[in-house]
Amino acid sequence: MFRSGKIILLFYFLFCSFSVLAQNKLNALAPKLSSFIYSYDVDPATNVLYYGGNSGGIVLGAIDGTTGTSVSWPNFGFPASDRVTQVLYSDNMIYIAGYFPKVNGYARKNIAAIDVNGNVTSWNPSGKGANIAGPTNIAADKNYLYVGDFSSTTLSVISKATGYLINDSVIVEDAGLPLLKIVYGDSLIVALTEYELILYKWEYNALLEPVALRIVGREDLSSYGFYFDPQQYYSRGGAALVILNRNIYVIDDFIYSGKHSGALKFKWNSLNNQLTKQNYDIDMWSLCSSPIRPTGVPDYLVQPKINNATYYDSTLYIGGFELSDMNKGSCGDSYSVLSSSPYTSNSSKGFSGNLLFGPDYYDVRQLKAVNNTLYQVSTREYVSGPDKYTIDSISAFCLTPMRPGEFSVYKAAVCPEDMGVKYEVPKVPGTTYSWTYSGTGATIHSTGTNSITMDFSLSPGSGDLTVIAISTCGLKSAPRTFHININIPPDANAGPDKEINCTDKSVLLQASSTTSGVMYSWKRPDGSTTPNAQPAVSKPGQYILTVLETTNGCHWRDTAIVTIDTIKPVPLILSGNNTLTCLKSTITINGSSSGSTDSLHWKDAGGVSWPNPLQTGTAGNYKLIVLNTKNGCVAVDSVTVSSNKISPAVSSLFTSADLTCKTDTLILSGSTTTSNAILEWLGAGDTMLNPAAIAKAGVYLLMATDTSNGCRSTQAVNINYRQYLPAINAPAGKTITCSSPSIILNGSSASLNTLLGWKGPGSYVSTNPATVTDTGIYILTVTD
């Protein structure tokens, strides 16, 4: 804000500048033709400068406000009689006013809108009933364009959206005089007439619809020696209005108290709708008690000494036309731009800055400060033979950048390990930024721009973040500083490391904190998270505990390592013959393992446990179960105990035989179909190989022995002793007589299975009974 107090204005030497672009265009004009720049404005977001003038080739154009180079725009086809006297950039649109019936072939009477690419838009107030005859000045807010006119005492209000003149639908109070200079600021529309300062303000209904534009304040300036000369304004002169924090500055060549002065300051009080003149010490800008009008100079150089101004970064820059020629008289110094800081009493000086682009002309007709740059329109006279003509040019000077604005994005307190914390100040085009941090443990990214991010280490220190704006010319602003505090992170304890094994297939992590009011979360090895103080986990890896303190948003971390031990023991079973045979009725199998502390036992198919070593006489499948007593892992191996107890096949020629008087020796013979079998005979106390000759009665065993399994089979053979004489009974002797010439001899035997036969004299042989006819001895033979 402006401060009251006396400011003494000193004058210093200044080189004013001339646009390279404008100069090149103007030099290409036909000789003897004067070319003027009536108005210009700057897009603060892109630094593109749009300007308008007379028909000398610069009626409407655009340049880069940083380099002065031309921006490609169309040739709008203005004839020689046309003039663009007003250029206003507002909300990405360029509004122009002046004296022209067409723009690039489109019917647009004295007012038009052009987009930033140079295209004429459909916005056309004259096509919708507005009659803008002689526009003197234009201003704009978000919704409306305000147009003053030489031919009207009423402010024309045009909708920026539709192009319609809204004076018929709302009340716009009559100023009583043509409105020659108009500005908008602080929700006020401020206008100058030839001798009066007028303030307008909107009235709204309950629906917040505008219903009237009222004159809320007016001040007669003639008593201060002010007079707005319309002809001077038309010739690119005239007064300037500056609005800042409801302070209104009127800049012109006043003749006040016998002195030429430069400014009046008024304060608008919105509470009581009162406009009050402030003590702005206008005497400080007195140049001479009586102005010196040098002879032999062009008319444009005898315009008011101070007639335009711009405000930038607490400094008011004032320009004039005669200042550069004051050294020809006895009053003043040769400066065309003066600067005054309202914040510092008794401090005002001539402006001196680095030329950004353009010629270094002295006289200044228009000033505008935007984005660290002071733009000015200067005028010079050229001679071509007997003819003289003048050309306006645009120059730009580097200003010391404004102190960066207040931080718009920031974090007043950060936590250790905060990453990507954004800090930002409003961006000013054509400006770079230097950032520094007085604390420790912080890294600044993207320095050079108006927006940075900061990464804070595990143990950062509090400090001041400072940003300095640097202009294109390398000028540096005052610093903007922001203090950053470091919050204390919460305590975090991830608990002991854990092990997953065959017994504990999942484990519980154990987070804790001595800080109250915290929240826990774990980051798993796969990157997923779980909001739990004691989650059950079943996978090995690194588990990162984050403890968040809910009061300040800080976090801290700790780590628990979950290992895994699921290595199974290695069962060892010695190879061998695990077959039960007739020779081996039990088998012992000794198992072992790779671990010295492993526990071993056996199980059969029925689930019955057996200690190690295994001793069994039963065939089947036996599992060796090895338990690692450290991790609970079990490994199993198995062994099959088979049985080979099949007796060999055995067969004898007979199962019973007799030793008789006829057969006193027998041959015992057996056979087998089993390979690897040995046959033997056992009996009568002897062991005999097969076949065996025997002469004794008794029971003989044919024994087959399988040499592969030791199993035996036997078959009994009963040998009877049949050498006992059979019983015999012969009849008594008989006598052959004449009456009995033959006798029947009938013997008998008490023995079974006997055969009886008779032999007698000669070769008599007969079976029993026998009939004999001869005397003699007959022998009865009983044969078993």
Image (cartoon, rainbow, N blue to C red):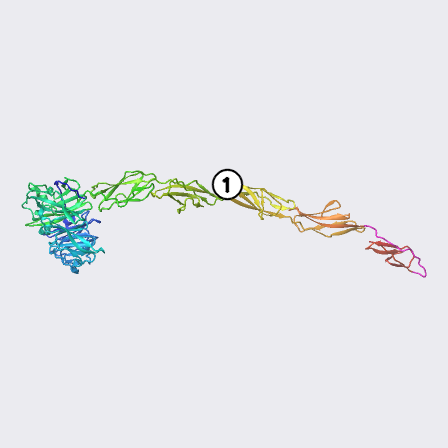
Kindly tell me whether residue 105 is visible in this rendering: no
Q: Residue furthest front?
A: 272
Judged from this view, the residue extending furthest toward the bottom is 739
Q: Closer to the camera, 743 or 729?
A: 729
The N terminus lies in quadrant: top left
The residue that appears at 27% across and 43% down in the rendered structure is 447
Q: Is residue 40 above or below residue 458?
A: below
Residue 259 on image: x %, y %: 7, 43
Assign a secondary structure to mark 1: loop
Q: Is residue 727 within the magenta segment?
A: yes
In this rendered view, identify the residue nearer to me: 387 or 534: 534
Residue segment shown in magenta: 723-741
Q: Main secondary structure of the magenta part?
A: loop
Residue 274 point in image, percent of width and height:
15, 48
Q: Is residue 141 visible?
A: yes
Residue 286 location, quadrant: top left
How many numbered badges does the structure rendering display? 1
**Along the horizontal axis of the image, is 635 left or right of 722?**
left
239 vs 684, left or right, is left
* Image quarter of residue 441: top left
Specify whether residue 171 is painted magenta: no
The residue lying toward the viewer, choosing from 350 and 271, is 271
What amino acid is found at the position of numbered circle 1 in the picture? Lys
Q: Is residue 308 left or right of residue 46?
A: left
Q: Which residue is mark 1?
A: 630
- Across and down, in percent, residue 699 comes to 75, 48
Image coordinates for residue 5, horizontal then vertical, percent: 15, 41
| Name of the residue lying farthest toward the right | 738
Q: Residues within 10 Å of mark 1 (few under 14, many from 20)?
A: few
Q: Is residue 552 left or right of residue 209?
A: right
